[in-house]
Image: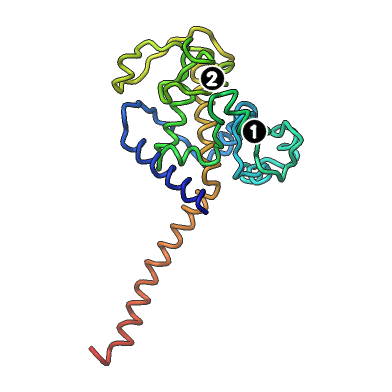
Amino acid sequence: MKKIIIALVMVSLSSLVHAAGGKIHLDEANIDLTDKASLQRGAKLFTNYCLNCHAASFMRYNRMGKDLGISDKLVEENLIFSDDKVGDLMKVAMTTEDGGAWFGTPPPDLSVIARAKGSGDLGANWLYTYFRSFYVDEKRPFGANNTVFKDVGMPHVLWELQGMQKLLNAEEVAKGAAPEFALVSTGSMTADEYDTAARDLTNFLVYVGEPSKLKRLALGGWVLAFLFFFFFVAYAMKKEYWKDIH
């Protein structure tokens, strides 16, 4: 229970920090949780490029498949690259000790990363901008840095898709300006294709953070409608009960 309380406090503090704005320029992600094709592409990117180091240990493979319209067979054949079973949680073999030794700090679990980076659209915008903001920095251990997360310990794992880019206006970025990049090596995707991939991956991580969000919002509408009509029923009952007194 103590660990849960501490985690909730850290998430809240993170949200407040990012909501304050700081000097970080964020682009609009414009994700759509109803777009299952986007979520499926995001799941493919996550399992291929992220799940080697980052777990999503609050999510099960078969729950993800059911929500995204992917059969258990396709999940097993295309999204599981270990001896995990389709009903297992999306964990990684890397230990905390190994992660700390290799990267300087253990790679975080990404189950609620979108919510940890800010409420509403803020978390999605943070992730979307982050995926697109790696640039060459020879001073860093893995040769890359990020304008959203300065001195990040993570390498640019999507470089094969995006290519590598250099930052052109570092001084302006430090003051809150939008970064300007120039490719120094091309990837397998065009700039537009990579932007779509970053949006798909962000979409998937937002889904993982709250898989039942769409159901919650839909149910909330029915609850509000019920309360609206029940108000008139309750008011009529109140008048009937109290008519002899008033």
| Closer to us: 147 or 3 | 3
Q: Give the answer, above or below, for where 180 lies relative to 96.
A: above
Nearer to the camera, 103 or 64: 103
What residue is at 54 percent from the left and 34 percent from the top? 108
Q: Give the residue at the far bottom of this rendering.
A: 244
Q: Which mark is residue 95?
A: 1
Q: Circle 2 — which element?
A: loop
Residue where numbered disc 2 is placed: 156
Q: Of the residues under marks 2 and 1, which one precedes in the sequence?
A: 1
Drawn side of residue 16 relative to residue 8, left or right: left
Query: Quarter-wise, where is residue 130 in the image?
Result: top left
The image shows residue 105 at horizontal and vertical percentages of 53, 28
Q: Which mark is residue 183?
A: none
- Quarter where residue 45 is shown: top right
Q: What is the distance, in whole Å, between disc 2 and disc 1 at their CAs?
A: 21 Å
Q: Residue at position x 52%, y 46% from top?
A: 210
Q: Is residue 20 above or below residue 188?
A: below
**What kind of residue is marked 2?**
His
Q: Position of residue 78 (x, y in %)?
A: 71, 32
Residue 166 locus on image (x, y percent): 44, 10
Can you give x and y, in whole percent of width and height, for residue 185 in the image? 53, 8
Q: Secondary structure at mark 1?
A: loop
Q: Classify 10 Å Cα crowding around label 1: few (below 14), some (14-19), many (20 and above).
A: few
Q: Look at label 1 and name its amino acid.
A: Thr
Taking the image as shown, residue 183 lies to the left or right of residue 52, namely left
Res 20 → quadrant? top left
In the rendered image, the residue lying farthest to the left is: 246
Residue drawn at the location 54% of the way across and 10% of the way down = 186
- Contact flag, marks 2 and 1 (Cβ < 8 Å): no
